[in-house]
Image (tube, helix red, strand yellow):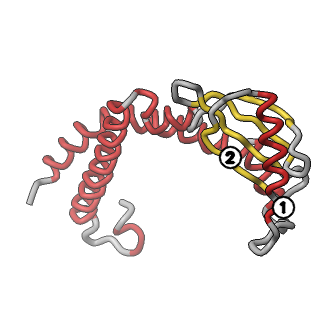
Amino acid sequence: MPTPAFWRRWHRWIGAPAALFLAFASVTGVIVAGTEFFGEDEAVREANRTLVSAVHTDSPPDAWMGAINAAMASAAKEAPGAPIDKIAIELKGQAPVITMYLGTKTGGEDRRLLFDARTGKFTRSDGYADKAFINRVHSGEVFGDGGLVASMVWGVALLALTVSGFTLYWRLAGANRQGRTGLQRWFF
């Protein structure tokens, strides 16, 4: 069985570089969570959560196809000949929306177009990327495949830090809890 000195040494060696990654993951994680919590999309999801859509599985196709056809006609005027990556339809809420994600002619993401799902009229356009920049920074993906591999490595390092720290605590707690009672046995 390894000695407490062994665990202390490895805990320090793992802890020093892991602290940098932990700080990076913590800061970007807080930004991702804050963006999600305070973002416009979350406000719309929360507002629509208790509403019931007027379109059901047994609704006739013209209950939703007309809006898609009108949105496609509007999209042809806004971005003639642009490739469509995907279409998302939100049928409930104060302002039901059809979102059309456009790609570039050479591949990749370009922009998204939003249309009123009741009328098919164009409402606005903005940039579009498959994942938000901060999410790609948080996962390491923004740095390419190497960043994703580094993210997995620092995840394993943080797990090793946790295991070595717990093992060190357990070994030291065992040595220091003799003669102690209650919580003092574990929090010395």
> Of 153 and 171, which appears nearest the observer?
153
Instruction: Report the side of 88 relative to 146 (left or right).
Output: right
Give the vertical position of 21 relative to 66 (above or below).
above
Q: Secondary structure at mark 2?
A: strand
Amino acid at the residue labelled 2: Ile
Could you classify mark 2 by the number of other residues whose Cα lies within 10 Å: few (under 14), some (14-19), or many (20 or more)? some
Residue in view at x 25 percent, y 52 percent = 164
Residue in view at x 62 percent, y 33 percent = 83
Q: Secondary structure at mark 1?
A: helix
Give the vertical position of 96 relative to 114 (above or below).
below
Q: Nearer the viewer, mark 2 or mark 1?
A: 1
Taking the view exactly as shown, the residue that stands out farthest to the left is 1
Residue in view at x 70 percent, y 49 percent = 88
Res 87 label = 2
| Image coordinates for residue 126, horizontal then vertical, percent | 74, 29
Residue in view at x 49 percent, y 37 percent = 138
> Of 148 and 60, which appears nearest the observer?
60
Of pointers 2 and 1, the one earlier in the residue sequence = 1
Q: Quadrant of residue 50?
A: bottom right
Quick one: quadrant of the N terminus? bottom left
> Of 44 and 77, which appears nearest the observer?
77
| Image coordinates for residue 104, horizontal then vertical, percent | 59, 26
| Residue highlighted by disc 1 | 62
